[in-house]
């Protein structure tokens, strides 16, 4: 296991630069990304389908439009999930890179695949997880204009629904040295909640992450809660429930932002018309400020010793 020690940084909770105002155009683009990725024409984005390829093309075009760099000569990184019988040989992770002042990397992730078509019904996966991918594009758009302290790697994973295979493939054949990755911010289902709540999971395992979230100066309607990571809390433990799980097993600190399951989870009714735009935009703002605080304030020391 890769062992890392998170170090406290005194500057971060006091002299924090104000969040630059996002424009209406930024939010219009965020909503448009959600509409495109959850549209019927993508046929539910099931791994190794035509709909998945359409999603890949769109996300790659957005990476290029934003100005992210490739790792190698393209955003697409193929892998073969050999345990499953797919229509093609490969699944595809989409990776965009933004160099910062430090060579250390904060990994910002969301899976773009979903369940495809079942019994003639399209499973659009608007919340799960067109919402998460749309917000990582929103974050990339911000940081391309405000150079980050850490280097940022934006990854849209494939085959999460098949068992976190995209994240596992990333670790098995990493496009960058895993020792450079000091934190994983993972987004999965972040666009709807009947009680206006979103959870940040991971602080139980990495307590020094807590003050960064507590310091978020958030005045919107969404309530940020910590939890779903303590085994004996009585709540469903999300520690390994999404693409951050394989990184946690390697000792990489993580924060996973997500809502609790709703009635449309993994149903064809998970459609964009169920999403409250005000909630979605406020979550995007909240996650953005959290990411800025983490980037500006955190310092890590790492050990290169595997156990």
Image (cartoon, grey):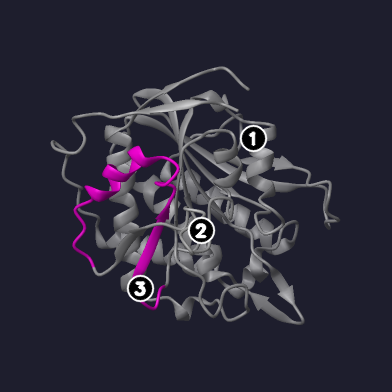
Q: Position of residue 74 (x, y in %)?
A: 61, 36
Circle 1: element type? helix
Q: Position of residue 46 (x, y in %)?
A: 70, 63
* Residue 212 falls left or right of residue 271: left
Count neighbours of disc 2 (C-alpha within 10 A) and say few if under 14, some if 14 to 19, many if 20 or more.
Answer: many
Please name the residue that numbered disc 3 is placed on: 277
Q: How far apart are marks 3 and 1 (CA)?
A: 34 Å
Was residue 301 drawn as part of the magenta stretch in this picture? no
Q: Which of marks 2 and 3 is in front?
A: 2
Please name the residue that numbered disc 1 is placed on: 171
> In the rendered image, which quarter contains the C terminus?
top right
Please name the residue that numbered disc 2 is placed on: 188
Q: Please, which residue is most extreme toward the left here? A: 15
| Residue 125 or residue 246, whichever sits in front | 246
Q: Residue at x 83, y 46 (%)?
A: 82
Residue 54 visible in image: yes
Q: How far apart are marks 2 and 3 (CA)?
A: 17 Å
> Which quarter of the figure has residue 183?
top left
Q: Which of marks 3 and 1 is nearer the N terminus?
A: 1
């Amino acid at each position: 296991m890769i062992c890392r020690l998170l170090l406290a940084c005194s500057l971060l909770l006091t002299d924090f630069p104000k969040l630059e105002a996002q424009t209406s155009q930024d939010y219009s683009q965020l909503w448009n990304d959600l509409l495109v990725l959850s549209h019927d024409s993508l046929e539910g984005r099931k791994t190794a389908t035509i709909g998945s390829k359409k999603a890949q093309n769109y996300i790659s075009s957005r990476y290029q439009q934003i100005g992210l760099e490739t790792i190698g000569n393209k955003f697409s990184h193929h892998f073969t999930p050999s345990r499953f019988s797919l229509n093609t040989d490969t699944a595809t992770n989409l990776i965009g890179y933004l160099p910062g002042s430090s060579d250390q990397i904060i990994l910002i992730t969301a899976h773009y695949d979903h369940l495809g078509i079942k019994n003639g019904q399209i499973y659009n996966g608007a919340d799960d997880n067109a919402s998460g991918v749309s917000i990582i594009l929103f974050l990339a758009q911000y940081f391309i204009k405000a150079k980050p302290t850490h280097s940022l790697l934006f990854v849209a994973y494939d085959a999460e629904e098949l068992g976190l295979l995209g994240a596992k493939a990333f670790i098995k054949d990493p496009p960058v040295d895993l020792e450079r990755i000091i934190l994983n911010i993972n987004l999965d289902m972040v666009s709807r909640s009947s009680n206006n709540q979103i959870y940040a999971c991971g602080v139980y395992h990495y307590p020094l992450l807590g003050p960064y979230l507590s310091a978020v100066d958030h005045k919107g309607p969404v309530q940020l809660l910590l939890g779903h990571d303590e085994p004996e809390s009585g709540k469903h433990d999300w520690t390994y429930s999404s693409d951050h799980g394989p990184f946690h097993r390697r000792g990489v600190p993580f924060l996973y932002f997500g809502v609790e399951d709703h009635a449309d989870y993994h149903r064809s009714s998970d459609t964009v018309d169920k999403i409250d735009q005000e909630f979605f935009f406020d979550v995007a703002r909240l996650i953005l400020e959290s990411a800025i605080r983490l980037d500006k304030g955190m310092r890590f020391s790492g050990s290169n010793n595997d156990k």
